[in-house]
């Protein structure tokens, strides 16, 4: 039991020297895979509530790392793949926790604790849903900013194209007038 909890503790406290974005993301993927494996394995039933929360929190933090980096105006971005994978891990951890709650034997201390927590579970679900909604709102806001910036660029390019067309039309009219004047003379 101590070993499986130590795996979560050590994995969530993992520190590494950043080298390149691609290499860093491989390390972050591996961290997520270790957390997923330890929660889902047979020995995962021995994880304490604190360890499960740490695993979930680590996945949540990695899933929101991109938004956090953008809000700090850091030039490095996290790939969409890492963001989606971390959210998938959060979903799998949640599923495992609820499946294990269903497997508890009635009358056992763990089942009594789960029954006492039954009023808390809807609250936890609403907190998770609110966090997911907030993350989606941040992502939508960034997408809207990017779309507005691209629209402004396209508007400037269209205005430049119209100005070039007007200049070409004026030049053609001047050339036509010059040619007509030359033929009349």
Image (cartoon, rainbow, N blue to C red):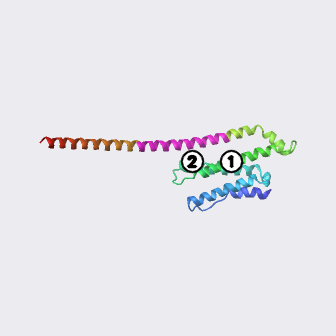
Instruction: Find numbered disc 1 in the image and state the secondary structure of the residue it sits on.
Output: helix
Q: Residue at x 77, y 51 (%)?
A: 48
Q: Nearer the viewer, mark 2 or mark 1?
A: 1
Q: Which sits in the foreground, 157 or 127? A: 157
Tell me the crowding category of disc 1: few under 14, some 14 to 19, or many 20 or more residues within 10 angstroms, Cα based. many
Does 12 lie within the magenta span?
no
Measured Cα–Cα span from mark 2 to mark 1: 17 Å
Does 138 lie within the magenta span?
yes
169 left or right of 63?
left
x, y percent for residue 23: 59, 61
Q: Which residue is mark 1?
A: 90
Q: Give me the disc on residue 54.
A: none
Q: Quadrant of the N terminus?
A: bottom right
Tell me the crowding category of disc 2: few under 14, some 14 to 19, or many 20 or more residues within 10 angstroms, Cα based. some
Q: Which sits in the foreground, 15 or 99? A: 99
x, y percent for residue 182: 15, 43
Q: Which sits in the foreground, 99 or 180? A: 180
Q: Residue furthest right?
A: 107
117 left or right of 86?
right
Q: Which residue is mark 2?
A: 67
Instruction: Find numbered disc 2 in the image and state the secondary structure of the residue it sits on.
Output: helix
- Part of the protein shown in magenta: 128-154
Q: Residue at x 49, y 44 (%)?
A: 146
Q: Where, by quadrant of the figure, is residue 30 drawn?
A: bottom right
Characterize the magenta stretch by its predominant secondary structure. helix
């Amino acid at each position: 039991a101590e070993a499986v909890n130590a795996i979560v503790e050590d994995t969530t406290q993992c520190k590494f020297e950043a080298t390149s974005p691609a290499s860093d993301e491989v390390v972050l993927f591996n961290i997520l895979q270790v957390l997923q494996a330890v929660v889902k394995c047979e020995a995962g039933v021995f994880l304490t509530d604190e360890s499960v929360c740490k695993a979930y929190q680590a996945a949540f933090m990695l899933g929101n790392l991109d938004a956090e980096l953008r809000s700090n105006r850091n030039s490095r971005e996290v790939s969409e793949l890492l963001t989606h994978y971390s959210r998938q891990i959060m979903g799998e951890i949640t599923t495992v926790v609820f499946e294990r709650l269903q497997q508890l034997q009635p009358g056992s201390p763990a089942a009594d604790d789960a029954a006492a927590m039954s009023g808390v579970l809807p609250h936890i679900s609403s907190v998770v849903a609110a966090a997911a909604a907030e993350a989606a709102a941040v992502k939508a806001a960034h997408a809207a900013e990017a779309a507005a910036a691209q629209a402004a660029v396209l508007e400037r390019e269209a205005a430049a194209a119209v100005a070039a067309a007007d200049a070409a039309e004026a030049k053609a009219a001047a050339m036509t007038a010059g040619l007509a004047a030359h033929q009349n003379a």
